Amino acid sequence: MPTPDITATEQAALDRILLDALDPLASAVRARATGYRVDRGRPADPAEVAPAVIGIWKVVDQEV
């Protein structure tokens, strides 16, 4: 079956939905890895976020 084409608007919506769904899990993983609380009252450093997000995407990829 060919991959369906989606519009840029649909792709943006899908990106937002996936990020919103995975953010709590990525935050929990990041908190365990860094020792910081999940909600530190300030935005997380991108250097801390990237490894957690990549790790979560790997888990999702394996599960799907």
Image: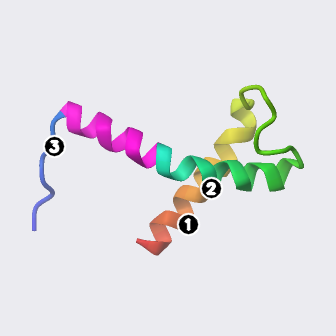
Residue at image position (59%, 51%) is 54
Query: Residue 7 occupies which quadrant of the picture?
Result: top left
| Label 2 secondary element | helix
Can you give x and y, in whole percent of width and height, for residue 46 in the image? 69, 31
Q: Viewed as shown, does residue 48 lie left or right of 60?
A: right
Can you give x and y, in whole percent of width and height, for residue 23 in the image? 58, 47
Q: Nearer the viewer, mark 1 or mark 2?
A: 2
Task: Please tell me how crowded label 1 is: few (under 14), some (14-19), or many (20+) other residues with Cα within 10 Å.
Answer: few
Residue at image position (55%, 66%) is 59
User: Residue lying furthest bottom in this view?
Assistant: 63
State the CA–CA distance, disc 1 to disc 2: 11 Å
As shown in the figure, which amino acid type bears the numbered disc 1? Val
The stretch in magenta equals: 8-19
Task: Please tell me how crowded label 2 is: few (under 14), some (14-19), or many (20+) other residues with Cα within 10 Å.
Answer: some
- Of callouts 1 and 3, the N-terminal one: 3
- Of callouts 1 and 2, the N-terminal one: 2
- Tell me the tag on residue 23: none
- Tell me the tag on residue 59: 1
Report which residue position mark 2 lands on. Answer: 25
Report which residue position mark 3 lands on. Answer: 6
- Between 19 and 62, the one lying in front of the other is 19
User: Residue lying furthest top in this view?
Assistant: 42
- Of callouts 2 and 3, the N-terminal one: 3
As shown in the figure, which amino acid type bears the numbered disc 3? Ile
The reply to whether discs 1 and 3 touch (Cβ–Cβ < 8 Å) is: no
Query: Residue 37 occupies which quadrant of the picture?
Result: top right
Q: Classify 62 as above or below 13.
A: below
